[in-house]
Image (cartoon, grey):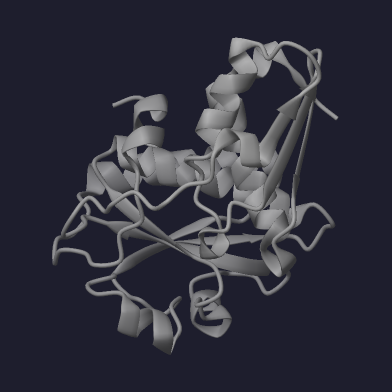
Amino acid sequence: MTIEEAMKERHTVRHFKDKSIPSDTTEKLNARIAQNNSDYGLRLELVTGNNDGLNVLAKLLGKGIKNYIILAGPDTPDLDVKLGYCGADMILYAQTLGLNTWWIGGMFSDKGARKSLDTDSVRINGVLAVGYGQTSGTAHKSKSAAEISSYNGDTPQWFSDGVEALLLAPTALNRQSFDVRGDGSRVCLTCSNGRFSGIDLGIGKYFFELGAGKENFEWI
């Protein structure tokens, strides 16, 4: 399965099977994490064998969660956008490996997650539960392209493809609070979702790039 195929197949899963992730698969996840950390200056970390990174409510809503990826990095102004972007890469990459995920934003345990980090000089903003889902999840109701996008002039195919991909992106509370505008080869994407705006913006940028092709436009 390619990343592009994973984008269409991935849905949120909260209930997981009592099945360990094989060592060769965890090695692949860790290699992808290491690449994201190197490229974006982050401290993502895969944790296996416990659910300490979830708060009480998440543990009640989820079942069988024993593995998660910590979304963390130095507390810079663009940290949330980078975490959203790289977190999006990780959930889709996990999907290509036959795994399912749940992006846990407001229901993670900072104290619990920090037990697995070797530094306190980072900010954590969410965890990604990962494992083998009891189901593959289901699609949620989505906004239309017209509700979140506009293009100055005749809309090129790459822009339409980018918006279609953007509508597949997971967002906090499934609000899809995106506004994407295109003019020539320039694209502006904003997101108004309160304290989740930075994370959602990073996720949205990753999905739009995947659909549109980074070679076809530039962010402004």
Relative image position of residue 165 (x, y in whole percent):
51, 32
Residue lying at 59% horizontally and 30% vertically, measured from the top left: 163
Relative image position of residue 125 (x, y in whole percent):
62, 67
The quadrant of the image that shows the C terminus is top right
Q: Is residue 84 left or right of residue 34?
A: right
The residue lying furthest to the bottom in this view is 56
Of residues 137 and 152, the one drawn nearer to the viewer in this rendering: 152
Of residues 49 and 146, the one drawn nearer to the viewer in this rendering: 146
Residue lying at 23% horizontally and 41% vertically, measured from the top left: 98
Q: Is residue 2 left or right of residue 128?
A: left
Residue lying at 21% horizontally and 55% vertically, measured from the top left: 132
Relative image position of residue 121 (x, y in whole percent):
73, 70
Q: Is residue 76 left or right of residue 160?
A: right
- Image position of 21 with respect to 156: above or below: below
Picture quadrant where residue 215 is located: top right
- Image position of 32 with respect to 151: above or below: below
The quadrant of the image that shows the N terminus is top left
Q: Is residue 24 left or right of residue 187?
A: left
Picture quadrant where residue 29 is located: top left
